[in-house]
Amino acid sequence: MHPIHDVDVLLLLATALASKRRPAELAEIMAAADLLHGSIPLDVDLAAAFVRLSAHALISEEAGRFTLTPDALEFMAGLPRMRKAEPAERLLAVKQELAGYTPKGEGAAIRLATEQISAAIMAHRVFLKSPGRNMLVPRPKAAVDKAKRPGQWRKPDSGRRHDRS
């Protein structure tokens, strides 16, 4: 699959993240892309990425929702485990693996209008301003004071046992 665009890699990872349990809506994919990259690419670039990835049989559409194809799931399972890696490192690892990927067949191209993608981006931005929480956004890490560790502390045992007579 040549050439590999950064938008393709981001869209593939965002779709994988958003569609873990069920096929994802377009706004959910935009939320995942925002989470992974910190911003959402242009609607024109996303529309072209959908066409490229679906033509290489990596993304499929089911009733207006998107998911990874079995080939893409197999491809993603072959990636090294990077649970604690930064998103930029994950994107680079997927891009390197995608460069060596050869599609097993042709897929049906998904052609989305830029207006449809723009509407999904706006829906995501409106949701961010609402008081509800986005389930894709990670919880903020609490700053732990190293001098004061949580938990109950006991005094060290002096080695003698107390008489209980």
Image (cartoon, helix red, strand yellow):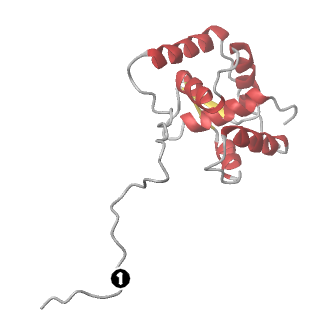
Q: Which residue is mark 1?
A: 158
Does 92 sit left or right of 118 as displayed? right
Taking the spot 66% from the left edge, 29% from the top edge, the residue there is 37
Quadrant showing the C terminus? bottom left
Position of residue 115 measured from the top left corner of the image (x, y, whole percent): 62, 8
Extreme residue toward the top, this view: 115
Element under label 1?
A: loop
Residue 104 appears in the rendering: no
| 92 relative to 131, above or below | below
Residue drawn at x 74%, y 24% as measured from the top left: 49
Q: Residue at x 70, y 24 (%)?
A: 50
User: Is 49 positioned to the left or the right of 18 in the image?
Assistant: right
In the foreground, 5 or 75: 5
Give residue 56's position: percent from left, percent from top. Answer: 76, 34
The one nearer the camera, 113 or 84, is 84
Q: Amino acid at mark 1?
A: Ser
- Position of the N terminus by quadrant: top right
Front-most of residues 5 and 63: 5
> Crowding near pointer 1: few (<14 within 10 Å), some, many (20+)?
few
Q: Is residue 19 above or below residue 63?
A: below
- Residue 15 image point, x, y percent: 61, 33
Q: Is residue 20 visible?
A: yes
